[in-house]
Amino acid sequence: MNGKEYHCPVELVIELISGKWKLLILRELMSGTRRFSQLQKAIPGITQKMLTKQLRELEEAGLVHRKVYPEVPPRVEYSLTELGSSLEEIFDSMHRWGLRYMEYRIGRQAPLKTSTDLDHLKDRS
Amino acid sequence: MNGKEYHCPVELVIELISGKWKLLILRELMSGTRRFSQLQKAIPGITQKMLTKQLRELEEAGLVHRKVYPEVPPRVEYSLTELGSSLEEIFDSMHRWGLRYMEYRIGRQAPLKTSTDLDHLKDRS
DNA sequence: CAGGATCCTCGGAGATACTG
DNA sequence: CAGTATCTCCGAGGATCCTG
């Protein structure tokens, strides 16, 4: 994310959001502010290390805001920045395309295993 | 690309286009049909192996069409399928977002190294 | 010309243990 | 609770050589 040279804005966008868990994290945060532990529960399979790392990258990218409450025990809340929220537009367009793609391919041959459990990304207006 | 389970269409789209060279290949093909060697020249730094591999994946994904001419010496032409062409819509939306993102960040602090030499992705039509 | 076949490197990502 | 700190593994990607 640092010191790299991007060929074009499209490549930049892909780098920003294509970490293995980033989409899931962003999706979760699009529903509202979440604590670290809430994210961990909401995203089965992710490790603490990975959640931390991906969140740091999203924060550095300016997509996610991190608020630390100086308490004991510690409390940290994550939320989307304006920039982060503005990604929905892209996600919508990708979501629409992806659905058309799946239909198209299923109509032919490709046995795409899909579980569209995250479809409500667009089912909310 | 095979045997994987996708959480949602958005993730699927990202997997389809996030190979290291896929964007560059797709961009090149959006300008028209290209031979293997033409692609290689148009994309500095890519190796034969990588070009072959990424093309095969794009072909398997149904985004790129591969036409072999039974001649000597061999000639193979690559072009976008309908599905491949339909990606432009997404690219446009990503391109717009990426530009806004860059402006926004440059206005603050982040020293993003960018060379928008591929900006004509949207400067067409 | 358009690849195929091999070997190798390097970093993303998992597992596990520890801490303010 | 919300993280670091290590160790390890695996596979994308690179380099190189070979061929119908």
Image (tube, coloured by chain):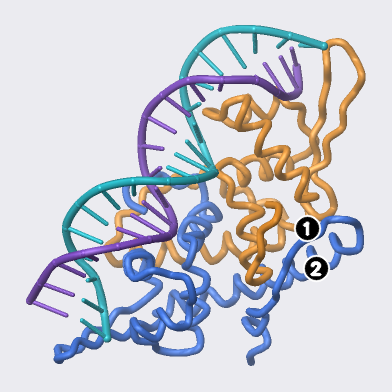
Chain colours: A orange, B blue, C cyan, D purple
Query: To which quarter of the image does residue A94 belong?
Result: bottom right
Task: Describe residue A101's horizontal placement relative to residue B65 as left or right.
Answer: right
- Decide if residue A68 is in sight here: yes
Query: Which chain does the residue under circle 1 lie in?
Result: A
Q: What element carries label 1?
A: loop
Instruction: Residue at 51% x, 55% y: name it.
Output: B9
Task: Describe residue A27's horizontal placement relative to residue C7 as left or right.
Answer: right
Instruction: Residue at 86% x, 63% y: name it.
Output: B106
* Closest to the observer, D2 or C10: C10
Badge 2 and badge 1 in a common chain = no
Q: In this view, does A103 lie above or below A54?
A: below
Q: At which x and y percent is residue A51?
A: 64, 32
Identity, as a three-letter code, of the amino acid under mark 2: Arg
Task: Please give the label number shown on residue B100.
Answer: 2
| Pointer 2 with pointer 1, Cβ within 8 A | yes
What's the CA distance linking mark 2 and mark 1?
A: 10 Å
**Residue corresponding to mark 1:** A86
Label 1 CA crowd tier, 10 Å (few <14, some 14–19, many 20+): some
Q: At which x and y percent is residue D19?
A: 10, 72
Label 2 or label 1, whichever lies nearer to me, is: 2
Instruction: Residue at 43% x, 70% y: name it.
Output: B46
Query: Which chain does the residue under circle 2 lie in?
Result: B
Task: Describe residue A1's horizontal placement relative to residue B8 as left or right.
Answer: right
Label 2 CA crowd tier, 10 Å (few <14, some 14–19, many 20+): some
Task: Describe residue A112's horizontal placement relative to residue B120 as left or right.
Answer: left
Q: Is residue A91 above or below residue B124?
A: above
Q: At which x and y percent is residue D9?
A: 37, 29
